[in-house]
Amino acid sequence: MRLLIDEKDLALLLEKKRDFVGNKVTADTIIAGISFLLSVFTASYEDILGIPGVVLKTVFCFIGIIYCLEITQDILSRIKNKYNHEVLFQDIEHLNMIQHNHSLVVIKDTASNRYLVYYDERWDCKLFLNYKTQDRNNESALKEQVAADLGLDSTNLLFDYIASRVQEKYSVSHGEMRIYNHRLYEIHCCDFPEKFKENNFVINGKHYYWMSIPEMEKDKNIQEKNLEVVDFVKEYIK
């Protein structure tokens, strides 16, 4: 998972949580506090520089009590707040400016130098195949999703991870600028059905097209809504 975090936001978070980060009372600290307190209670002190031994003992006992009280307070504070490295990581994750993690799946017809796209109704645009990136086993999930969408046998699909890129682009479906982390994959199939030889076709209610990069670049709708992704694919998949 890739995070995009503003440095000022991270610095502010760490400033707010500085009293909790690393605030850990170990068993050695507790044993040391108890041992010190017991030692001063049981020890006998002689007069030093005119100061009575009982006064010295009282001072050291007072210091030991304060020390043990501070340890107790730290323990109670830790139990109450329960702030550890896992909670800190969650707080850092919440600062992530990336709003969408998507995997782009590119299928290329090398003979015609064209790429498979589909018409997306929400975007009212032809897009490369794309799926929400999974936190675990993303490639396995992609293989099953692509196979289901295109009516293919998943065992015939080979995936190559190409690159990833954080991009800020306008989201048509949300009507605002959003930050995406795009993972780019190229897929190879050992046995495409005959239908795939047509310039456009429909599978499971979704309309697919074969388009070259120059055709995408000349398409005004794609230019306005998805040119950043086209440039990304053009740069890495020749």
Image (tube, rainbow, N blue to C red):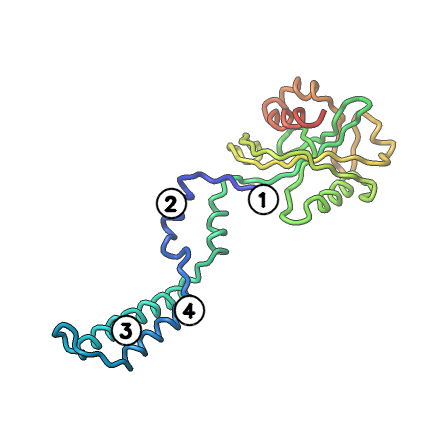
Q: Label 2 near label 4: C-beta < 8 Å? A: no
- Give the amino acid at mark 3: Ile
- Give the amino acid at mark 4: Asp
Measured in 3D between alpha carbons, the distance from the residue under mark 3 to the one under mark 2, in whole angstroms, is 36 Å
Give the class, few, some or many, for how many residues have Cα within 10 Å of label 2's Cα (few <14, many ≥20): few
x and y percent of residue 51 in the render?
14, 74
Residue for point 64% across, 29% down: 124
Which disc, if any, is residue 12?
A: 2
Helix, strand or loop at label 3? It is helix
Is 57 in front, or is 7? 57
Q: Is residue 35 above or below residue 120?
A: below
Q: Label 2 near label 3: C-beta < 8 Å? A: no
- Give the amino acid at mark 2: Leu
Residue annotated with mark 3: 65
Which disc, if any, is residue 164?
A: none
* Mark closer to the observer (3, 1): 3
Helix, strand or loop at label 1? It is loop
Most distant residue in the left direction: 50
Give the class, few, some or many, for how many residues have Cα within 10 Å of label 3's Cα (few <14, many ≥20): some
Residue annotated with mark 1: 1
Q: Label 1 near label 2: C-beta < 8 Å? A: no
Residue for point 58% across, 35% down: 173
Residue annotated with mark 4: 28
> If you read the primary sequence from the N terminus, does the residue marked by circle 4 or circle 3 appear first?
4
